[in-house]
Image: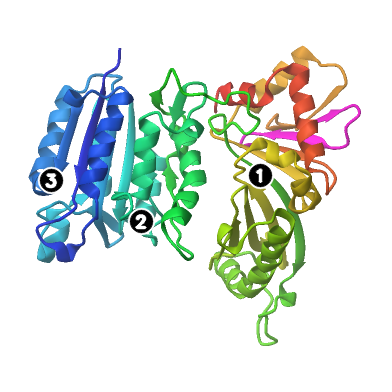
Amino acid sequence: MANRWALLVAVEKPLHPERGSAAYAEADAKAWAEALVSAGVPKNQQFHLTNAYATKAAVESRLRRLKKLIKKGDELFLFWIGPGFTEESCGFLNCWDTLPDDAPATAIGAVELLASLEATKAGQVACFLAASGLAHEELASHFEQSPKAVGLLASEADEEALTAPAIKHGVWSQLVAEAFAGHARKAVTGGMMTALSLQRFLEDELPRRLRKYFEGNVRQTPVLFGRQNAGTVLAQFANVPDGSDAVLDAGRLRRLVFRSESTTRVRDLTNFRKTFTVPDTASPSNRKFVQRIATDDIRAELNRVFEECREQFGYKRKDLELTVGQDGTGTIRTPDFEFTLFVDLVTDEPSQIVWRREVGQFADADFIRSAEFQGGVGSQFDQLVFEFAKPVDVTEFIDRVEDTAPAGLKLKVGGEGKSCDITLTGFAGTVSVKRHAVVVRGRTGSGTGLLDLFLQVLSKFGSLGESLALLPTR
């Protein structure tokens, strides 16, 4: 049986505080340590380094020790909370004794640390980082190439990992501890908590906790790197309800959204001036230009949806969070769902803009069928999209459907077998299956019709979502 090991590092009050600090880091590390016991990591297989014990020499010593102890197939966790920094595009984690005038040489390189963990014989490596100032591009690239590591970060690179004096913990850190302790039902599917199901729980619950502890428009976005390894099982629980009958099964799929798209001309944007040139290519610079000048139009559309949500669902102002980014995106978070707006150039017609509207992050599957949702926001969409946690083998799925040949179901296959379209007698619309997603297309204004079509397809030959998620990847 595989052993589980953990390295926990907390740098709350470094020797040189001008390098940064991390409030409640030690308390967070203690909470993680206790929760890990519930997740099958005994205390004698946990290495704790906090404050003055979290020197660079001590971290390197524990890494060498772990490399000797870990056997083939064991499982390894890293929990690190403390300040970090980036120099020459490389991220570093401050140790307790990091020197201000020689920081890179006396800190731990983030990617170097990850590489050391992956160099052990562990079959899987799960990393949890609540560290500010790290270069996310570097981390994303490393995790994307890793065959066995997955990383969960407390926030985006330009955001703070917020701490709440009311609970004397980091908000994200406390949620992670609750999940590992088995106190987060939404993080568990089929008795198992995977990196993906935990991430979806964090994305769903963190905004609610932030609204509880802070006033104003605070923002913290949890990040998952290494999605190819997102199925990594972090913990198994025997007594946590798994919600396996739910349509919105976070452990089975990466996300579910209702979607619609429309196009307009670039020159019709409010901030487009006569002196501007209409793009003739969808280059990165042209995309950034259009996304920048579209900010006011995005804000206007979000304000419209904001008022629509208040009127239709009875939300109060403090229940809603509206955010406009500089990258052509805007978001409205509500207690029941999240509305997102994306603006980008049309690739093959760069004088046009595509407006993609999505609703997802549903708190309750039953909300989709509510009259309020279907009569308002939900009536604006003509696609229902299920994105997979991992790419699936569509050709094998096609073979299974053709072997089963359910009555009333028609299958149209792409020439190379990389996609297929399903139609069903009695239902208007199609279900398209691709390596990364299932897309249900129908008439605008019938969200339940899209969902019913998908469920009817499921009934023809079992759980499509589950079957696809279990198919071999390529």
SS state under label 2: loop
Q: Quadrant of residue 102?
A: bottom left
Q: Residues within 10 Å of mark 3 (few under 14, many from 20)?
A: many
State yes or no: residue 427 in magenta.
yes
Which residues are drawn in magenta? 421-438
Question: Of the residues shown, which amino acid type is indicated by label 3?
Answer: Ala
Colour scheme in use: rainbow
Q: Above or below — where is 245 with respect to 419?
A: above
Q: Which residue is mark 1?
A: 257
SS state under label 3: loop
The residue at the point 52 percent across, 21 percent down is: 190
The residue at the point 29 percent across, 29 percent down is: 36
SS state under label 1: strand
Q: Position of residue 329 (x, y in %)?
A: 59, 62
Q: Which residue is mark 3?
A: 54
Q: Above or below — where is 71 with respect to 217?
A: above
> How far apart, in angstroms, are the residues tagged by discs 2 and 3?
22 Å
Q: Which residue is mark 2?
A: 162
